[in-house]
Image (cartoon, grey):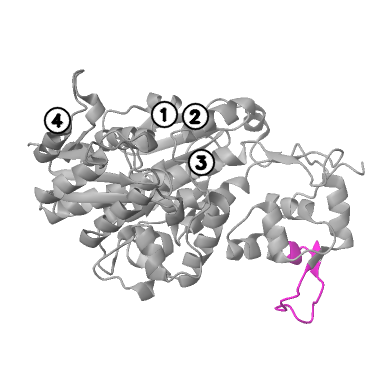
Amino acid sequence: MKKIRIFISSVQKEFAEHRKALHDYIYADPLLGKFFEPFLFELLPAGDHQTAAIYLKEVEQSDIYLGLLGTEYGFETSEGMSPTELEFDHATRHHKTRLVYLTNDENENRHPKELTFIRKAEQSLIRRKFSGIDDLKVMVYASLVHYLIEKGHIQTGPFDASISSNAKLDDLDEKTVRAFVRLARKRRGFSLNETESIENILTHLNLIVDEQLTNAALLLFAKDPQKFFISSEIKCASFPGTVVEKPMTSYKVYRGHVFELVNQAVDFILGKLDYSVGTRAEQVEIPGEYEIPKEVVAEAVVNAIAHRDYSSNGSVQVMFFRDRVEIWNPGTLPLGWTAEKLKQLHSSVPSNPLLANPMYLAGYIERLGTGTTDMIRKSVAAGLKEPDFIQTDEFRTILYRPVAKAIEGPDTPHATPHVTPHVTPHVKRLILAFEGSMSRDELMERLQLRDREYFRKSYINEALRLKLIEMTIPDKPRSINQKYQLTSVGMSIQKVLIGEVE
């Protein structure tokens, strides 16, 4: 099959890194690399390839012209035009498919000729704004998939980019979308405000095409994602020993949008890991750490959800053992990759880029190929065996617990020996978080939790049941001014946890 040639706009200093990143990304992506051949002008053999005739001929021989417009106009020919504008005009004359992407800069910061060029381009096609290389990759991916579908090269798009014909905008949870925007602005400087229309937000994220929702939009923001994708759930089980055997000590099936799935699965694992406590000697907040670093656990869970094969009937599974935690997902590595490559610095080629991009913006995922190497580094720094990555019919990540834990047993407390056995790890964390009277939002912020319902059930309600905390307005439990404080028993346990009493 002859590949579809993409001419990436010629040498521009402003976009040298962007153009190289796009070239490498298209080649490496399992889908795009199969259909497209990106062309960079500077990769031509040495010679006189600064003449307009050479690069305009390359435009003619390509199927797609991909232009990047920013603040600089660049080198001007004797005609007073930049090579990029000449290429764009040539692509227009020869009826090439043109994809133009514009930096997210204010117009007053652009060169006057660049601004005139942008306005000319706007008259003949829709251009999209990007804020960085990763943002640009996602936009190009969505455009090229749409091109393949339009030209009949593929009958259906990748799962996350495919249209869900029976879904409507009303199926999305507006509160979840706006909460995402708030978080994305805080974590990654997302350019839109939460007051924007839902359609504008989804369009900016490439999650809606011709007023139809993509699968990624539903996985991220639907009120009931499992109505559309029944296998989009996480099954979590814990076992008393080192093998899968009955009876299980705990079993949960979590459902919801992908952010909820991450939060619930991470909390399931953290709730079963031992949590050691330091003192307030050098800081206001009480220092503490899990036997497996929280960042390692979160990265493993996020990877399983973001990179899984959503067309599979299988689901993500978490299995908690006496000596390790295993996270399984129905997915495969990119073509030509091995599990060993994940232990080295590598490029990021997400299986579901339209799903991964919002997870990156919300701070759930890294997109620079450092996630798995960070997991290894942080595990080793914590004195643990480095994680294993195994590809068979499914993909497995194995996180190892401390050797001492495997010997003591899964429920043997060693960091907080004076705490009554029925106080769960979640409640211990809650007790340690208290300083006077605190609202639910203040407690969630301190504990770095996002799922309000899970926090209410597993933390607040359990601590209230044990009479370790109490409401400051008990006769109005739903009051907007409601706060919580430790009871005398709760304060005693807090002192034990921070080592203030023997």
- Per the image, the residue denoted by label 3 is 299
Judging from the image, what secondary structure is the residue with disc 2 in?
Answer: helix
Percent position of residue 122, x then y: 27, 59
Frontmost of labels 1 and 4 is 4
Work out whether mark 4 precedes mark 3 in sequence or the reverse, and give the earlier one. Answer: 4
Crowd band around label 1 with a 10 angstrom C-alpha radius: few (<14), some (14–19), many (20+): some
Q: In the figure, 282 relative to 345: above or below?
A: below
Q: Which residue is pictured at 37% across the width and 46% down the height? A: 70
What separation in Å lies between label 1 and label 4 (alpha carbons)? 40 Å
- Per the image, the residue denoted by label 4 is 54
- Per the image, the residue denoted by label 1 is 342
Frontmost of labels 4 and 2 is 4
Closest to the observer, 326 or 263: 263
Marks 3/2 in contact by CB < 8 Å: the verdict is no
Disc 1 residue type (three-letter): Leu
Judging from the image, what secondary structure is the residue with disc 3 in?
Answer: helix
State yes or no: residue 477 in magenta: yes
What separation in Å lies between label 3 and label 2 (alpha carbons)? 11 Å
Marks 2/1 in contact by CB < 8 Å: the verdict is yes
Tell me the quadrant of the picture where the N terminus can be found.
top left
Span colored in magenta: 462-483
Work out whether mark 3 precedes mark 2 in sequence or the reverse, and give the earlier one. Answer: 3
- Per the image, the residue denoted by label 2 is 373
What separation in Å lies between label 2 and label 1 (alpha carbons)? 7 Å
